Image: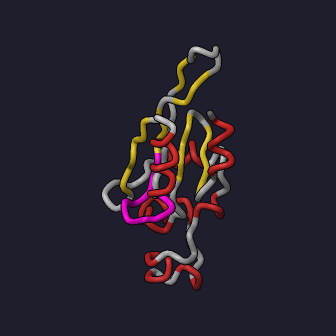
Amino acid sequence: MLIVFLVFFVGKNGKYEMKEVQIFGTPKCKETQKAVRFFKERNVKVHLIDLNEKKLSKGELNNILQSVKLDDLIDTESKKYKERQLAFKVYDKFEEILENPTIVLTPIVRYERKATVGNAQETWKKWQ
């Protein structure tokens, strides 16, 4: 999973241009790789957070949830989701994501106060 944040600057055309994004994901995730490539092709700096190494903080997750529904974050096809048999349990989704971030659908891309989950190129294009 990846989360991305963006910093903008005013370009020569007077419009704001995306300068940096934050992507939460895993390096082996093909959708995360596509997101990284999408932004790099547009000269946007990518700050990649590997969810295998770093968990989401409560603040990061709350910021993401301003744009994305909690249920949309959970990848019911993920290995960790199946290992933990979450389909058969009643659990606190927020706390489960904090504890096991690899159950999240990736990439999570964050720009300013906006966020997307999964491959959302049409939305990312509107951010530019």
Q: Does residue 98 appear to the left or right of 125 in the view shown? A: left
In which quadrant of the rendered image does the C terminus lie? top right
Residue at coordinates 47% horizontally, 33% vertically from top-left?
20
Residue 55: image x %, image y %? 38, 55
Of residue 27 and residue 74, the one placed in the foreground of this image is 27
Residue 85: image x %, image y %? 50, 84
Residue 24 makes an appearance in the image: yes
Residue 105: image x %, image y %? 54, 64
Span shown in magenta: 23-32
Residue 112: image x %, image y %? 56, 33
Of residue 102 and residue 61, the one placed in the foreground of this image is 102
Residue at coordinates 57% horizontally, 26% vertically from top-left?
17
Residue at coordinates 60% horizontally, 45% vertically from top-left?
115
Vertical arrangement, residue 1 with respect to residue 81, above or below: above
Counting labels gives: 0
Of residue 90 and residue 61, the one placed in the foreground of this image is 61
Of residue 75 and residue 48, the one placed in the foreground of this image is 48
Looking at the rendering, which quadrant does residue 10 occupy? top right
Is 26 part of what is drawn in magenta? Answer: yes
Residue 59 makes an appearance in the image: no
Q: How is the image coloured?
A: secondary structure
Is 72 part of what is drawn in magenta? Answer: no
Residue at coordinates 49% horizontally, 75% vertically from top-left?
78
